[in-house]
Image: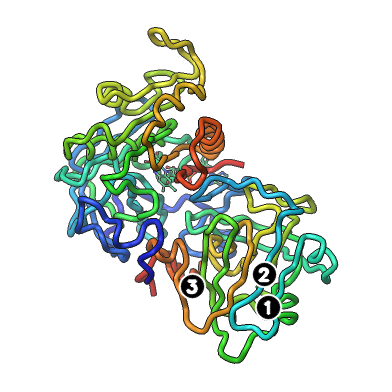
Amino acid sequence: MSADGPDGPDDVGAIDAVTATTTAWTTGRIITHDLPAPHLVRLRMHVEDRQRHRPGQHYLIRLRAPDDYTAQRSYSLASDDDDPLVEFLVERLPGGEVSEFLADVAEVGDVLELRGPIGRWFSWDTRTPALCLVGGTGVVPAVAMTRTARRLGRPDLVRVVAVGRGPDDLPYADELDRAGATLAFTRQSVGERPAGPPTREEVAALLDGVEVAFVCGSSRFAAFAEGLLTEAGLSPDAIRVERFGVTG
Amino acid sequence: MPVTRGFFRRRPDGPESRLPPGQYDVGAGWPVLTAEATPHLERDAWSVRVDGLVDRPTTWTWDDVQQLPRSAYTGDIHCVTTWSKFDVTFGGVSVDTLLEAAGPTADAAFVVAHASTGYTTNLPLADVTGGRAWLVWEYAGKPLTREHGGPVRLLVPHLYFWKSAKWISRLELVAEDQPGFWERNGYHDRGDPWREQRYQGDA
Ligand SMILES: Cc1cc2nc3c(=O)[nH]c(=O)nc-3n(C[C@H](O)[C@H](O)[C@H](O)COP(=O)(O)OP(=O)(O)OC[C@H]3O[C@@H](n4cnc5c(N)ncnc54)[C@H](O)[C@@H]3O)c2cc1C
């Protein structure tokens, strides 16, 4: 193992115990299950043998049928490491094998197979000034980052630009708004801000001192966000991207 | 491990024999997955070098690789994020052709594939020889787009697709295995989809 990568073991940050690169399957029990919007489900789970995580990391959730057929998908953590439960926010995709199950069938008390945390590259080290440019359910890792920054007493370290069609479509819109995020709604004008994607000026205004940018959302969103950040003057080397879901 | 209450097999049995465990058929789509911003790389600025434990370290430019014997792959590809894509066609040159020219030494046992972005991934030499790996610049008969690694990417279709480094710039032959970018970040060193070698610690 080499320690000289951008995410090498020397770069662990405040959550020092987060060094594991091997994680085993475990189980988690659903403690709360609610639908913040008709197409969104929030799960809070108690995890057996839980390992510490950095904000930005994700878990695998695996469903197992009686004939041993399984389906597994990745879900980012919304929760901070000091939360006794892990929190997931999943968009219910019509026809989606796992998301539809989690929204419509899963209930409080159900036990699911889990594996995590995974993904050290797309995680915040809790020290470096960061900008999150996130869209739709891509806000989830940014929520974990802002929660962690607040707990550490350094809310200034994580700036967020969150993009959704309207306030009702954007998960955690209220929480992000209270945390000082820039919310950009593409289909609805809210307050002074006319409807539309975030502009180069809106992003550039937040880049001062930023050393790393986290882009998360659909593939189409990620391509847009990369372009916007580089046009606003950020070096491509500073951009880390996580793409959710299926696109052409 | 527990059966999940209320969850039943939904995918039909038929085409699943072509699907490695835990994968699903993405159909006509081709998800773009990259950890970094997509680079703009002009063909004329691109080159690939084969070096390390070889007798004749060699660099090929875009024009040089066009002169090499063409080789194509038609078959399936599998991504660790659980999609698989059936019957894709890539065109380019066999890695065997490049290695023949460079002449690996007897102690060369692994390859580190480097991309122009700094991305790396490691492979046993045996996984990129014997007609199992390509440098490709065409997909479905058209130039490979830059989101998918154009102008030229590595293609190692029998392993998970993170091994098929986009924007390939160098194949470095080494004696000992050296984990690459995702491998240092928790992914498996080999990545055989049929054995579900996704993460470090998988058999
Ligand atoms: C690192 C990471 C983190 C993620 N975090 C989150 C998160 O926090 N929240 C979140 O909501 N999502 C997240 N995702 C996405 C998530 O993993 C799933 O991709 C998503 O929930 C869809 O899964 P599904 O099983 O519901 O849908 P799938 O069954 O995978 O289907 C997705 C779409 O493709 C179509 N489809 C699937 N299979 C076929 C087929 N054989 N033929 C035709 N069409 C098909 C479906 O109809 C559906 O529209 C994350 C992804 C990654 C990689």
Is ligand 1 closer than 8 angstroms to the Cβ of mark 2?
no
Looking at the image, the residue that sits furthest to the front is A209
Label of residue B190 in the image: 3
Residue B135 location (% of width, % of height): 70, 65
Q: Is residue B164 left or right of residue B190?
A: right
Q: CA distance from mark 3 to mark 2?
A: 23 Å
Residue type at mark 1: give it. Answer: Pro
**Which comes sooner in the sequence, label 1 or label 3?**
1
Is ligand 1 closer than 8 angstroms to the Cβ of mark 1?
no
Looking at the image, the residue that sits furthest to the top is A192
Dots 3 and 2: beta carbons under 8 Å? no
The residue labelled by disc 2 is B49
The residue labelled by disc 1 is B57
Q: Chain of mark 3?
A: B
- The image quadrant of residue B131 is bottom right
Label 3: which secondary element: loop
Label 2: which secondary element: strand
- The image quadrant of residue A192 is top left
Is ligand 1 closer than 8 angstroms to the Cβ of mark 3?
no
Asked whether residue B28 is in view, the answer is no
Dots 2 and 1: beta carbons under 8 Å? yes
Residue at the image point whose x is 57% and y is 41% from the top: A247
